[in-house]
Every structure is written in C-alpha cells, then in structure tokens.
Image: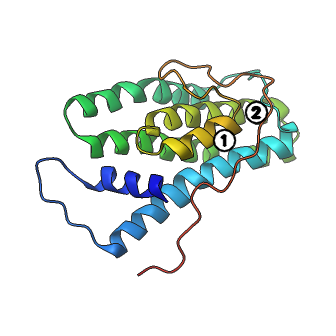
Amino acid sequence: GVDGTRYLLLREMQFGQDSEFSPEGLVRRYNADLAHDLGNLANRIVNMTNRYLGGVFADPPSETDVDRDLRDAAIDAPDAVRAAVEAMQPHQAVAEAMALVKRTNAYLEQKSPWTAAKAGNADSVATTLYYAAEALATAAALLAPAMPEKMAALRRAFALPETLHVGGWGHVEPGARLGELPPLFPKIEDEP
C-alpha cells in the first residue's frame, strides 16, 4: 500500500547521498519492520488485551524496573526523532521510531504476560499490556508522518484521538475499550 511504500522510501533514503533500492531488499525491510515488528506487535497487544482483559485497558496497578525502562524509552523517543528531523535525516527519524517498536516487542518477551496470566498474576498482565499499548501509541504518533492511514487505524483501535499529542506518558485511557484493528501490514510471501 501507499503507507508501506512511503515508509520504505523514508527508511531507505539518505538525503544528500545516492540510495540504491532493490526489490528484494525492500520486501525484506517491509516484512521485517512492518509485517513482523510493527504489525505483529499491534496484533499481540490487541489479542492479549481481548483475551486476558476483556478488551479493556486496565489502570496499571504496579510498576517494576522493566516497566519503568520502557516508559522512559517511550518518553525519550520523540526527542530522538525530532533531532533526526532537524538534522534532515528522515531515515534516522523513522529508525528511531522503529527502535521503540522493537524495544516494546522485547519488553513483551521479557514480561511474558501469557505466562503471568497462566500463573494468575493479573496485576502483571494489566501493567504489561498497558505499558506496551502506551509505548506503541507513542511509536504510532512518531510514525504517522510516514504512514498516516495505517497509524490512524491503529490509534482508532486503541481508542485514541485522531491527532495524538507526541510526548509524555498516559495517552491510553484506562477503561477504554479496544476497537477493531484491521491487518495493518500483511506479510509479503513471494519475495522477488
């Protein structure tokens, strides 16, 4: 789609330098960044929030050092993106936003809410899914210039306003009900 193409061009193109594009390289980047990292993260948060929390974001009841580290990364990310934009390095701005997506994926693996749910640790599940959703909301705001339609769909699914204030913490409203999230970035199976 248009959003995926725009993302790939911004991600791969360095201003002031010749950039080489190959179909294989672009498909690999699309599958790795968009289908796997971003699309998969959004789906996991939606699916687990529906499964474990009845589709409603819970007010996080506790915070560990691991949660705090993700929160700090999300709060710091807009400054890193802004610095890259001011340096006329759009590829770096997009990379900084995607670094938060990758960081949030790693956080989910570390916190393992599926294991916490089996163990009956509802507080950990609620906190983990709220923090992951909040970090993804920040990443979505930062990626909106590259992928306006897809990130608007993500914001709608997370019951966020159309225009999301970038910066800070606490955009996802506890008690908000998840909406439908269409598949954002279906994987491209046939690599050229």
Amino acid tagged 2? Ser
Residue at point 66%, 41% (across, down): 111
Q: Do labels 1 and 2 touch, CB within 8 Å? A: yes
Q: Mark 1: which secondary structure?
A: helix
Q: Mark 2: which secondary structure?
A: helix
Residue at point 67%, 36% (across, down): 156
Instruction: Work out whether 149 lies above or below 23.
Output: above
Residue 46: give x, y in percent of width and height. Answer: 73, 45
Quarter of the image for residue 121 reads top right
**CA–CA distance in space, label 1 to label 2:** 8 Å
How packed is label 2: few (under 14 Cα within 10 Å), some, or many (20 or more)?
Answer: many
Residue 111: assigned label: 1
Residue 70: give x, y in percent of width and height. Answer: 54, 31
Q: Earlier in the sequence, mark 1 or mark 2?
A: 1
Amino acid tagged 1? Lys
Task: Work out whether residue 136 or residue 27 is closer to the camera in this orientation and state it.
Answer: 27
